[in-house]
Amino acid sequence: MALALALASALMAWAWHARPATLAVRWHGLLIPGAALSLLSLFLYALRFRRVLHMFDLHLSPRDGLRIVSFAVFCQFFMPLGAGAELGKFLKLRGLAPQRRAMVSIAAIALEHVLGLLAVVTLAGASFAILKPFQLHLDGHWLLVAGVAIVVLSALTVLLLAARRGLDLAQLQALLSTHKSDAVLIIGWSMLMHVVLSAAVYVGSLGWGIAIHYPQILFVLTSAALFQAVPANLVGLGVADIAGTGLYVALGLPPGDALLLVSLLYCYRLLAAMLGGAWEFRRVR
């Protein structure tokens, strides 16, 4: 945790030094509602996770769901190769339902990723094609094709892994057919989660005079989220953060402003990780 705090401080300090000297006030009151919105997005994340488990007849209270996902964020900061969050969820599910097959927990986590990825692709494509967040020399049709390809390849990967580990794919298909409304609700929770998280970044950055609008932040966050599956992570800093910085620069922002926005999101995740770590420490005691 100390290393994560040091990294967050270093990123913020670098960004501030890169800012124009005319910006005198570094703290503003909107950072507080921004942090509150980030925690609201964490709660929406918990609701999405609970609904996925409901499809597998695993029922959690909202409190337990929030405790698991916050602990997963905590694990993400300390497990390399981006596997911390999934491992944290798996361990918690095994502790709550040890009588269930381990593959059931793995399938639930994998299905959550696939449906969440579908929501991210939809939001990223819609924000680019409809909201026009910035002028980019990129064919929107190719963006849509790339997004669909990512979802299809991810789904095939999950199915292949599930088949190799002994999960009955016919049962999985029947599960999706039986719980179509749940799948739609999961995608809806996921979209709302990203919408609120983008609002948290936008509100939290309003006092810094950064020339960016909410639709642009929504596009950057959802597009960068496509890279979260890349297995590379250092104290919570991953490929998605690098991609987000590049997209902000593509918007025309100075590198200092881009890094400042990415650092703000990183601090929001760190806040969720600290909440999950403190919650788990209190429970263990």
Image (tube, rainbow, N blue to C red):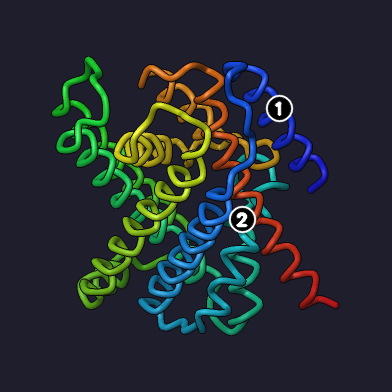
Q: Is residue 54 left or right of residue 137?
A: right
Front residue of 118/261: it is 261
Front residue of 69/173: it is 69
Q: Secondary structure at mark 2?
A: helix
Q: Which of the 4 image quadrants contains residue 279?
A: bottom right
Res 159 seen here: no
Question: Up-down: is 63 above or below 191?
Answer: below
Find residue 17 and report its horizontal and vertical position in percent.
67, 19
Find residue 252 and report its horizontal and vertical position in percent.
38, 17
Front residue of 215/165: it is 215
Residue at 50% in and 79% down: 62
Q: Secondary structure at mark 1?
A: helix
Q: Residues within 10 Å of mark 2 (few under 14, many from 20)?
A: many
Q: Disc number at residue 73? A: 2
The amino acid type of the residue labelled 1 equals: Ala
Point out the image quarter for the C terminus.
Answer: bottom right
Marks 2 and 1 sit apart, C-alpha to C-alpha, by 24 Å
Q: Are marks 2 and 1 in contact (CB under 8 Å)?
A: no
The amino acid type of the residue labelled 2 equals: Val
Res 149 seen here: yes
Q: Disc number at residue 13? A: 1
User: N-terminal of the two: label 2 or label 1?
Assistant: 1
Question: Up-down: is 226 above or below 116?
Answer: above
Find residue 95 and report its horizontal and vertical position in percent.
66, 77
Q: Which of the 4 image quadrants contains residue 16?
A: top right
How many numbered marks have been drawn onto this rendered protein structure? 2
Residue at 40% in and 25% down: 247
Q: Is residue 33 left or right of residue 6?
A: left
Residue at 62% in and 16% down: 21
